[in-house]
Amino acid sequence: MVCADTNCWMAYLAGETARDVELMDQGFRDSNLIMAPVVLSELLSIPNLMPEDELQFVAVPLLDILPDYWHRAGRLRAELLRRKYRPKLADTLIAQSCIDHYVGLISRDRDFRPFARYGGLRLLV
């Protein structure tokens, strides 16, 4: 299973060609693309979202929120803050969802690197 960050979805919708978009295409073909709930919320927040794009988003299975998720996410963010990083809350929640399910994350965002280094996130791009 693989999960794509919001920035990858935006590139995918824009028709860009890059490694992350190729990985998403492969995930669609293999039926192993899954979405973090926070990513879905971010995508559905797009003001001019096309109805066909919304249908595509909601068709992708969501990662479940596991027991004690919020506690683990808070501790993960605290760990990065202690190490002088400035993790965004949304990024923390996406990373924790992926870590909980041992799902690789496709992202263009360098802000996820500390989650990989100190939290066990598996970054694919």
Image: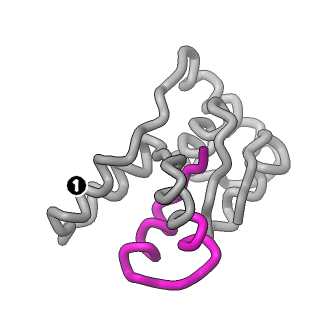
Tell me which residue sits at (56%, 24%) in the image. Answer: 69
Q: Is 118 situated above or below 24? A: above
Question: Residue, x 67% and y 61% (percent of image)?
Answer: 111
Q: Rate crowding at label 1 as few (under 14), some (14 to 19) or many (20 or more) other CA atoms within 10 Å.
A: few
Residue under numbered circle 1: 55
Q: Amino acid at mark 1?
A: Leu
- In the image, residue 55 lies in the stretch drawn in magenta: no
Residue at 75% x, 48% y: name it.
Answer: 122
In the rendered view of the protein, which quadrant contains the C terminus? bottom right
- Residue 87 shown left or right of residue 89 in the figure: right
Q: Is residue 11 magenta?
A: yes
User: In the image, residue 114 lies at what x, y percent?
Assistant: 77, 53
Is residue 14 rendered to the left or right of residue 20? Answer: left
Furthest residue to the left? 51
Figure check: 114 above or below 82? below
15 or 113: nearer the eye? Answer: 15
Residue numbers of the magenta segment = 1-23
Q: Vertically, is 109 above or below 69?
A: below
Q: Quadrant of residue 68?
A: top right
